[in-house]
Image (spheres, rainbow, N blue to C red):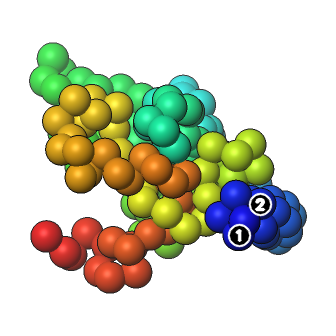
């Protein structure tokens, strides 16, 4: 009962509260993104597998330049990250638009991070179990070292 009803209600209530509280920071982030790189959109959208491996669109603030090459040379991801984007990633502000994913019911606050769609074909049956629950903004890896763990 908790997982089916109460968790969803708590996610929805807290997502709305956090969205209201975070809206000034989100407006500042959107303005900073547009000021630094006005060519691209404010939000980055990407398809990810969610609960039951159903594909949904995850939202984040865009942290990279739209251009992928300079002088005929492909730019690396590190070269494409903007100064504002680096700050947004370091502070995890780039993740705030995922509050809309929680409100829509695609995500939860806590759960396995949604990985890329192209990984689906490579999961073992045990790894596919991650899709038995809604993906989350935060999960085990984020509270146990984030990118510093193997």
- Please give the name of the residue rendered at 40% of the width and 81% of the height, measured from the top-left corner: 143
Which SS class for mark 2? helix
The correct choice, above or below, for 73 with respect to 29 in the image is above
- Please give the name of the residue rendered at 24% of the width and 24% of the height, measured from the top-left corner: 69
Can residue 142 be seen here? The reply is yes
Q: State the quadrant of the C terminus.
A: bottom left
Q: Residues within 10 Å of mark 2 (few under 14, many from 20)?
A: few
Are the residues at dot 1 and dot 2 in contact (C-beta closer than 8 Å)?
A: yes
The residue most toward the front is 1
- Residue 147: x and y, percent? 26, 69
Give the residue number, with chain letter if any, for mark 2: 5
Judge by depth and name the residue closer to the eye, 111 or 145.
111
Which SS class for mark 1? helix
Label ID, residue 90? none
Q: Is residue 76 left or right of residue 48?
A: left
Tally of numbered discs: 2
Q: Residues within 10 Å of mark 1 (few under 14, many from 20)?
A: few
- Residue 8: x and y, percent? 74, 59
Give the residue number, with chain letter if any, for mark 1: 2
Q: Is residue 7 left or right of residue 58?
A: right
- Residue 5: x and y, percent? 77, 60
The correct choice, above or below, for 143 with respect to 4 in the image is below
């Amino acid at each position: 009962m908790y997982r089916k009803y109460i968790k969803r209600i708590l996610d929805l209530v807290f997502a709305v509260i956090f969205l209201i509280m975070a809206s000034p920071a989100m407006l500042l982030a959107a303005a900073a993104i547009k000021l630094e790189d006005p060519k691209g959109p404010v939000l980055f959208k990407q398809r990810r597998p969610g609960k039951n491996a159903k594909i949904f669109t995850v939202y984040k603030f865009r942290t990279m330049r739209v251009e992928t090459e300079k002088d005929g040379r492909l730019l690396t991801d590190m070269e494409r990250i903007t100064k504002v984007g680096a700050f947004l990633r370091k502070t995890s502000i780039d993740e705030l638009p995922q509050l809309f994913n929680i409100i829509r019911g695609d995500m939860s606050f806590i759960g396995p991070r949604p990985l890329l769609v192209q990984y689906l074909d490579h999961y073992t049956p045990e790894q596919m179990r991650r899709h038995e629950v809604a993906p989350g903004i935060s999960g085990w890896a984020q509270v146990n070292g984030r990118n510093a763990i193997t």
